[in-house]
Amino acid sequence: MIARCSFCHPTHLILPSTRRVPLPALISAVGPHAIQRLVQFFTAEIRNPNTRAAYARAIDRFDRWGSANHAPLADLTPVHVAAYIEHLGRELSKPSVKQHLAALRMLFDYLVTGIVPFNPVSPVRGPKYVLKSGKTPVMNRDEVRQLFAALAGPMIADLRDRALIGVLVYSFARVSAVLHMDVGDYYQQGERWWVRLHEKGGKDHAVPVHHTAEEYLDAYLAAAGSVTRGDTPLFRTLDRHRRLSADRLDRHEALAMVKRRCRQAGLGDRFGCHTFRATGITAYLGNGGTVEKAQAIAAHESPRTTKLYDRTCDAISLDEIERIVF
């Protein structure tokens, strides 16, 4: 019975590794079996916590729209969904609209079993969106040096932040993959040190450590001392005494740290954690690296994804534009 479900609450769902998810009124109006299918969808079908949270927001937004427009779940048609996508397109970017549509399509595929007669989202097409260059802001060489110079302090917070940013920029890693590392994921193999990154889809991805990142990690771990065992989080939060706690740093805290550190270094507020992935790839390609090798280091499925991070052509384009003189 749904009343015994440990994930359920009268107004929301409590899902693993995810904040509370509002219980959609369109689902709860159908009854306990529909709620059970929703719980199964979030827990059994979606394993990635970030995807789970994003899809929960998308479904909650659609639920509020459907409730406001008096559209019961069983009566939804492709016309309703198309109208909602048109409405969404006036408020969100095209990639966000496509993500919301993907969440709804996946949910209704799950609800077809015993809840709705067909998937009303399947025939609905999302907005066309072709991305040829990434939008993530990239640091130039001087800005990278300026940031690391500002992180040269002796405090454990300085050493932790410098090591974290060093791993991000020198391994092209996603911030979530780095934050999920334990101390034992920084290890020696032969004469080289490596990091083991926990990537999307449950894949482990090993990358040799750049000598500069190795220096930053060693300094951080030496200062951390005995509190760092192999099975404990590599990057941790700080307690109120500015000492390392036992808690793993999460991506929201990491973003706040990066924003704060960039402001302190005089770089403004426009850079985020993903900046270092794009910055590392751009520097690598600008120094003669190949797209194929960059793809392997970054663990991208396609070289087209890697090319989105390459901004070496930006400077070339600007030089050409400056040739226009009157």
Image: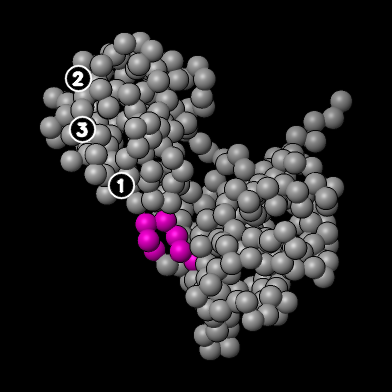
Q: Quick one: 315 or 210, which is closer to the camera?
A: 210
**SS type, badge 2:** helix
Separation (CA) of disc 2 from disc 1: 27 Å
> Which residue in the protein does label 3 denote?
32
User: Viewer-nearest of labels 2 and 1?
Assistant: 1
Residue type marked 2 = Ala
The answer, for residue 218, to whether it is visible in the render is no
First to last magenta residue range: 197-203
Residue type marked 1 = Ser
Residue type marked 3 = Pro
Magenta-drawn stretch contains 44 = no
Question: Measured along the vertical axis of the image, is residue 76 above or below residue 269?
Answer: above
Residue 250 screen position, x and y as percent: 57, 54
Residue at 49% in and 66% down: 197
Question: Measured along the vertical axis of the image, is residue 69 above or below residue 232?
Answer: above
> Which residue in the protein does label 1 denote?
6
> Which residue in the protein does label 2 denote?
74
Question: Measured along the vertical axis of the image, is residue 94 above or below residue 50?
Answer: above
Label 2–label 1 contact, CB within 8 A:
no
Separation (CA) of disc 1 from disc 3: 14 Å
